[in-house]
Image (cartoon, rainbow, N blue to C red):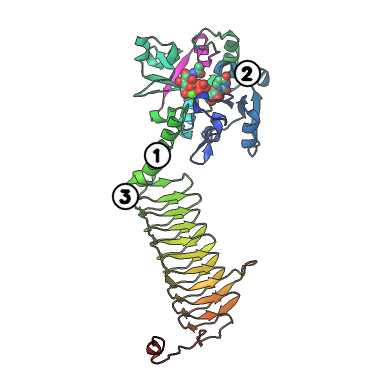
Amino acid sequence: MVAVAILAAGRGTRMKSDLPKVLHSLAGRSLVERVLDSCSLLDLDKQIVIIGYQGDKIKQALSHRQEVEFVEQTKQLGTGHAVQQLMPHLEGYQGDLLVLNGDAPLLRPETLQQLVKTHQTEQNAATLLTANVPNPYGYGRVFCTGDNRVSHIIEDRDCNIAQKQNRRVNAGIYCFNWQKLAESLPKLSTNNDQQEYYLTEVIDYLSSVMAYDAEDYLETNGINDRCQLSAAYDILQARIKNDWMKAGVTMIDPDSITIDESVQLEPDVILEPQTHLRGNTHIATGSRIGPGSLIDNSQIGSNVTVLYSVVTDSEVAANTTIGPYSHLRGEVKLGESCRVGNFVEIKKTTVGSNTNMAHLSYLGDATLGDRVNIGAGTITANYDGKQKHPTTIKQGSKTGSNSVLVAPVTLGENVTVAAGSVVTHDVSDDALVVARSRQKEIPDWHQKNNQ
Ligand code: UD1
Ligand code: CA
């Protein structure tokens, strides 16, 4: 049996924020949510979040997670005091208790799984996650006898100069035998620099206690201020990008690229500099995205190119090229082998295959068939100031440069629209439509007007 308790009652003074620290967002998810998600591989009997400072806000932010229970720590007297609040709540509980600092958002689920497994096979009273870090400043130092047996933990501010040399730090991630922990919690003192009840003091009363080193020490990073929050974003990004590169994605200048965790990429995708992939985006094999593109919540087929463009909430089929400087504003579905070119904006529009719109157009609330050619500067006038109206352009049709299609309007199959037309009525299949005034020439007009 395993239960988890997350320490989230502190204010996080060093963040200099009105928002409780654990509600600060890291790449789209709050710190406390990330900590909860790091338990995803464990079969948990209970999930408890210990709240205090602005606890209602934390409750509200986690209200969609019905399995989470809250325990209140009304005064924040230290991490040990926070865990003491669990005693009435967990009375008679016979399993293990995982205690996680709410400000450690970089833990991998596999690491927690290994920690619990080690704890259970070794039958320890406590097993804690540790790491040897290059800069241990601010962390509690873990002192071990041989064989990873922990003798005690000393907080950075309570260490003497020699003790500060120890680079093995406490990650604030522990697995306890609850019964043994419950017996030790009443023994905590406030005999330290901050005069708080430190959870780390229980190590002095428990045996045996074992340290489990994280394979990647960056996982143990805690967030205490905004610099560490920003560093954590970089660590997450490096992790995501390395995983995709190992899975067969090429990245040119990865430092300039950002990718959300929710994005899915196939092998042989190429990401060029300054490309940002967000939300529920999937990109199929052979596609080349960037330089300078943003793809948000969109499905991109294979062998698509997107150059200096923005694609939001849209679907693009295979072999289509987008950009430079195109904007798919949402609810756009492009068929195969289409071409969307310079300064083309598309909204709520479905397009067949082999259709081109290469220059300076706006298409909104439109349905285009296959093999349509949209001439430079074609505009769907879809909004009458009150309502949006649809435009339909059937297969094989061509619009001349600078055509305005005043919706609602339908062009049949194989229609040709003369350049500069303002089309206000439906056009039949195979017709040429000319909707502009005939050119008039007045001879010698210059001389007559300059006498
Ligand atoms: C703590 C550990 C330190 C470890 C570090 C890892 C202690 C005494 N020290 O230090 O050994 O290296 O984490 O990041 O535990 N909290 C409460 N109630 C309180 C105080 C804190 O719920 O009364 C919560 C905070 O909201 C936070 C977590 O506990 O999520 C850790 O508190 P923090 O003050 O950041 O501890 P550190 O000084 O970083
Ligand atoms: Ca901390």
Residue range corresponding to the magenta coloring? 197-216
The verdict on residue 70 being magenta is: no
Distance between mark 2 and mark 3 Cα atoms? 51 Å
First in sequence, mark 2 or 3: give its number. Answer: 2
The verdict on residue 203 being magenta is: yes
Q: How crowded is mark 3: few (under 14 residues within 10 Å), some or many (20 or more)?
A: some
Circle nearer the viewer, 1 or 3 = 3
The amino acid marked with disc number 3 is Ile
Distance between mark 2 and mark 1 Cα atoms? 37 Å
- From what the image shows, is residue 172 above or below residue 274? above
* Visible residue check, residue 246: no
Q: Residues within 10 Å of mark 1 (few under 14, many from 20)?
A: few
Which corner quadrant of the image does residue 139 belong to?
top left
Which residue does the numbered mark 1 point to in the structure image? 239
Residue 232 percent coordinates (x, y)? 43, 34
Which residue does the numbered mark 3 point to in the structure image? 252
